[in-house]
Image (cartoon, rainbow, N blue to C red):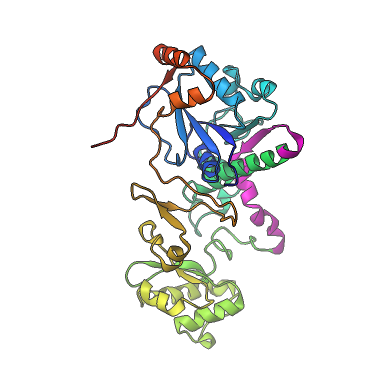
Amino acid sequence: MALAGVRVIELAGLAPAPFCGMILADFGARVIRVDRTKVTMAMDTLARGKQSVALNLKKPEGVAVLKRLCVQSDVVIEPFRKGVMEKLGLGPDELQQENARLIYARLTGFGQSGLYATSAGHDINYLAMSGLLSMLGRKTEEPYAPLNLVADFAGGGLMCALGIVLALLERSRSGKGQIIDASMVEGAAYVGSFMWKSRSIGMWNRPRGENMLDGGAPYYDTYQTSDGKHMAVGALEPKFYDQLIQGLGLDPANLPPQMSFSDWPELKQIFSRTFASRTQAEWCDVFDGTDACVTPVLPLDEVHSHPHNRERGSFQKDIQGEVSPRPAPVLSRTPATPCLSRDPLIGEHTVSVLEEFGYGAAEVEQLLSSGAVECNKFKARL
């Protein structure tokens, strides 16, 4: 796989950092998640392909173990607020003195500098600060966040993974690591570059919810069908719009022009009544194979069985029967081969990882006895 041979230390966190680590693991990196001791259940649901080491960072011995893991690895993913790792003596300056090739990825909401650098926050706060949240929402409604996808995952975990891969590529030429300051505010804003760059051509000059791509246009929206399901419509270009009108069985001579903003509410009512006249399956029969840009809105429990997704193998089942997306993008020579076994228990691999990093059996036993590390073994149910 593309990242085979890369060793990553991921300090346990929530959402964006685990996603970043899972991306790297999916594409072949060896990802070791560092958990706290005395924690019974991991909150990380994105632990696919990772190993877990449990360390007590309140003990100097636990801190020393973490330092040893970091300086013998290629990448560290650190999700804490500014200053936390420095207090432990494990900031990038300290670690890169011993391993100049180390890539130190700092994934935070507001970044390592600025007024809010030490402030708490969540996806909705970062999205708000990026400017994007002000653009999201229906007409006459308050702004709303689309789950926690834009800042946490797109602007956070995914952008951080991109930064790590870029740093690895540059290291192959320079032989030097570097520090990655991954701010979810800036990552989300960067994901929204199209919105920023297209303001000059008038795409966003109307109030929220009244523009072409934010629910204002009747030909870029979702509609309920007679069976309570939905169809998604994205017929932006005139040639696609013509096929939409044809599929709906409407006479274009009786409709207002596609780009008449003042007539959009009326046109949306017409589309709503028409889509409500048939089931989702019936509309799929009408539009599948056309360029009307009309597709079913698939619920999570049906997406893997759709013929297109099934043919491509876009979704996979693990050994526990849980469905999740196949890693993307698909590489022709070194595709991701995600692990399909269960997620690791907290501290399940502590002993084996310490031995791999050069600890002898007596040293490991001493660390376990002192409470500096913890090892939890999986017990099979017979």
- On the picture, is 127 further left or further right than 46? right
Tell me if residue 52 can be seen. Answer: yes
Q: Nearer the viewer, residue 223 or 181?
A: 181
Query: Residue lying farthest right?
Result: 174
Quadrant placement of the C terminus: top left
Q: Quadrant of residue 225?
A: bottom left
Q: Quadrant of residue 379?
A: top left
Seen in the picture, residue 288 relative to 7 is either above or below; the reply is below
Q: Position of residue 245 (x, y in %)?
A: 50, 81
Seen in the picture, residue 204 relative to 353 is either above or below; the reply is below
Q: Nearer the viewer, residue 130 or 153?
A: 153
Q: Position of residue 243 (x, y in %)?
A: 53, 81
Q: Position of residue 22 (x, y in %)?
A: 50, 42
Tell me which secondary structure the magenta stretch mostly adopts: helix
Q: Nearer the viewer, residue 149 or 69?
A: 69
- On the picture, is 33 further left or further right than 213? left
Residue 23 counted in the magenta span: no
Residue 190 counted in the magenta span: yes
Query: Residue lying farthest left?
Result: 382
* Number of numbered callouts drawn: 0
Q: Position of residue 101 (x, y in %)?
A: 69, 30
- On the picture, is 381 further left or further right than 302? left
Q: Nearer the viewer, residue 351 or 304?
A: 351
Residue under the point 48% across and 46% down: 148
Q: Quadrant of residue 206?
A: bottom right
Tell me if residue 256 can be seen. Answer: no
Residue under the point 50% across and 13% down: 61
Range drawn in magenta: 172-201
Seen in the picture, residue 196 relative to 85 is either above or below; the reply is below
